[in-house]
Amino acid sequence: MKISIGNDHAGPDYKKAIVDFLEKQGHEVINHGTNSTDSVDYPDFGHPVATDVETGKADLGIVICGSGNGIAMTVNKHQGIRAALCWTKEIAALAKQHNDANIISIPARFTSIPQAVEMVDTFLKTDFEGGRHQNRVNKIACQ
């Protein structure tokens, strides 16, 4: 699977751990994130991830910022994106099962690195249930 990842200054250590995990699992990673803790603007790293997922260059995306909110708001501006802010593996599973999320947003300042890796693992392994949820997902994008 191809995974696009982007992060701001709050997430370089998270990104490194997640990329290491993904590559060990055999996934290809497209890295749009910063490797520095110097202050940057999360939209500069979120938009490329959303574009990768929206255009099919990547199968799924991962975005990371301090609260997870700003970068989630950014990527959700793209019509083909359904990003979910997650802070537990259970929420990550539900985001895929019920909402067909295609990007997971991780709050670096409110989760540990092992939690983040666990959420990513769950997110990748969980399938969309479809059925009654499909009609709701169809209503998310603006027409």
Image (cartoon, rainbow, N blue to C red):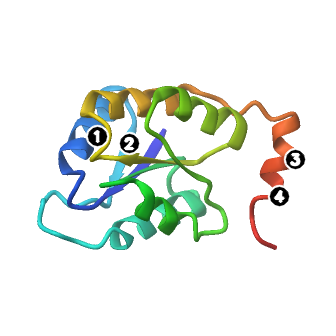
Q: Nearer the viewer, mark 3 or mark 1?
A: 3
Q: Nearer the viewer, mark 1 or mark 2?
A: 1
Q: Residues within 10 Å of mark 4 (few under 14, many from 20)?
A: few
Q: CA distance from mark 4 to mark 3?
A: 7 Å
Q: Nearer the viewer, mark 4 or mark 1?
A: 4
In the picture, measured across the screen, residue 95 lies left or right of residue 116, that is: right
Could you tell which of marks 3 and 1 lies nearer the N-terminus?
1
Q: Which residue is mark 1?
A: 19
Mark number for residue 28? 2
Q: Which residue is mark 3?
A: 135
Classify residue 95 by image quadrant: top right
Q: Tell me where residue 124 appears, x and y as whole percent.
A: 51, 32
Q: Type of residue at label 3?
A: Asn
Does dot 3 land on a helix, a strand or a loop?
helix
Could you tell which of marks 1 and 2 lies nearer the N-terminus?
1
In the picture, measured across the screen, residue 99 lies left or right of residue 58, that is: right
Classify residue 48 by image quadrant: bottom left
Please name the residue shown 27% across and 59% down the image.
Answer: 33
Could you tell which of marks 4 and 1 lies nearer the N-terminus?
1
Q: Are marks 4 and 2 in contact (CB under 8 Å)?
A: no
Q: Please, is residue 138 above or below residue 141 in the view?
A: above
Q: Are marks 4 and 3 in contact (CB under 8 Å)?
A: yes
Q: Which residue is mark 4?
A: 139
